Amino acid sequence: MTQGTGLVDSHQHFWDLSARDQPWLRRPGNEPLLRNFTEADLRPLAAAAGVTATIVVQTVIEPGETPDLLTVAAGSDLVAGVVGWVDLQADDVADDLAALQARRDGGYLRGIRHPVLVESDPDWLRRPAVHRGLSAVGRAGLCYDIVVPPEVLPAAADAAAACPDVVFVLDHLGNPDIDERPDERWIAAVRRLGGLPNVFCKLSGVLGQADAIRLRLWYETALAAFGPGRLMFGSDWPPCTLSASYGEVVATATALVADLSEAEQAAILSGTANRAYRLG
């Protein structure tokens, strides 16, 4: 990483429990997260870690959250963009996207995400109605963040192949189980996604689960599939704090990329996110 260049955290969250419920926080093990996490909480952590810009990502399937996140971004010199939510299967999804972008702070909208983790249908990303919604996202000039369990990665690849004009961003390396060695099915799915030029990948989520030595094989698989030009750092703060501090997550990412050239490090730690989400 070139000295003096700030890091871009491509994946973090905020929530205010007085504004809306976050049902997933009541799952066993998530109890430490059952409080408010705000831009003011993240700001000193980001400054200490050398992070100068972030992307805040939706957490609930509810239309009111995205406007609130846009308001936060407009009032912050840290938050550079928002990945929000709309109902992709709605007949008027294009109108919903246009309404968000027409807001005074609508320029901060950089992507859309639907948490497929909550869908019982493993073929949700193969639905024609979803593909129509994804195409509307692409026409609006936005990315689509993919968050799926590992077994749904083939369906995600099918969606990305069916919508070549849409930029997709795979969150959390596809949520692999960090076991002794990467699962062969996960490897095959990541390689297939990496073979699609419209797919990027986030080195996020897993960074709080293990140190750089243990994560090496998963990181190297993603790096080989996507290259530095389509791989980007994300903290997944505050969920990462269940097992690691913000500073530790950033340190793990920088340790993983330390053997790359300065230009390649700069891509993963800032440039790829800038390009994928069209920051600045």
Image (cartoon, grey):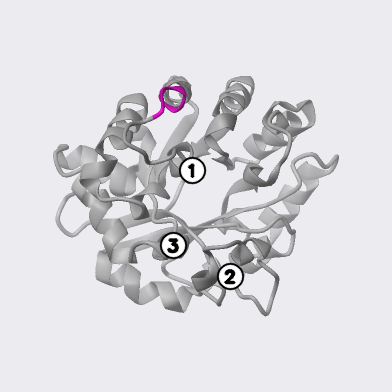
Residue 266, horizontal then vertical, whole percent = 24, 45
Would you identify the image quadrant in which residue 183 lies? top left
Residue 116 drawn at (x, y percent): 65, 42
| Residue where numbered disc 2 is placed | 15
The residue wearing badge 3 is: 237
Q: Do labels 2 and 3 touch, CB within 8 Å?
A: no
In the rendered image, residue 72, in percent from the top left (x then y), is placed at 56, 71
Quarter assignment of residue 8? bottom left
Q: Secondary structure at mark 1?
A: helix
Q: Where does the magenta region start and end?
A: 183-187
- The numbered mark at residue 171 is 1
Query: At label 3, which amino acid type do we have?
Result: Trp
Kindly report the secondary structure that dominates the magenta region of the rendered protein: helix
Q: How busy is the neighbourhood of tag 3: few (under 14 within 10 Å), some, or many (20 plus)? A: many
Q: Earlier in the sequence, mark 2 or mark 1?
A: 2
Q: Nearer the viewer, residue 243 or 235?
A: 243
Amino acid type, label 1: Asp
Q: Position of residue 17 (x, y in %)?
A: 64, 76
Q: CA distance from mark 3 to mark 1?
A: 13 Å
Residue drawn 17% across the image and 37% down it: 260
